[in-house]
Amino acid sequence: MNDATPLPPVVLALDPAEQAALESEIREALRTVVDPEINIDVVTLGLIREIVFHSAETEVQMILTTPFCPYAGSIIQQIKDVTRNVAGNDVRVTLLDTPPWSPDLMEGGDWGEWGLI
């Protein structure tokens, strides 16, 4: 399901503080992308593993809650659209095999807090 082999990071003309600010802005915007099956956003779920800035594009490296997620295509497209709106350049989403998703990757709280157990 990968768009392509990950590119080596080539940092845009951003200093580390600007890069950190842009990554934070992207992550905050990605909170609007919700897994429709569990109604929790991709950042809270811990699906967004890394955001890498290349010279011509922004790469979002992510995992899925399950390899057979029926909403993967829709979620990936939303991630591309939201990231493109913030970063202002092309976006690549790379699906990672590891780590496999588990509740431990979620931001704060626990499963009971979200009514999942």
Image (cartoon, rainbow, N blue to C red):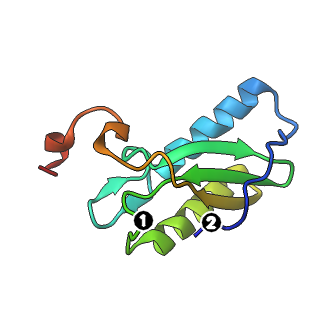
Q: What is the CA distance from the residue labelled 1 to the residue labelled 2?
A: 12 Å
The image quarter containing residue 83 is bottom right
Q: Where is residue 15 in the image (x, y as percent from the top left)?
A: 81, 27
Please give the residue where the numbered disc 2 appears in the rendered image.
2
Q: How many marks?
A: 2
88 to 71, vertically: above or below = above
Q: Position of residue 117 (x, y in %)?
A: 11, 49
Q: Give 101 or 12, whichever is nearer the viewer.
A: 101
Please state which amino acid type lies under the numbered disc 2: Asn
Q: Position of residue 27 (x, y in %)?
A: 54, 43
Q: Is mark 1 on a helix, strand or loop?
A: loop
The image quarter containing residue 18 is top right
Please state which amino acid type lies under the numbered disc 1: Pro
Callout 2 crowding tier (Cα within 10 Å): few <14, some 14–19, many ≥20:
few
Please give the residue where the numbered disc 1 appears in the rendered image.
67
Image check: 6 left or right of 78?
Answer: right
Do the residues under discs 1 and 2 have CB atoms within 8 angstroms?
Answer: no
Mark 1 or 2 closer to N-term? 2
Q: Give 10 or 2, whichever is nearer the viewer.
A: 2
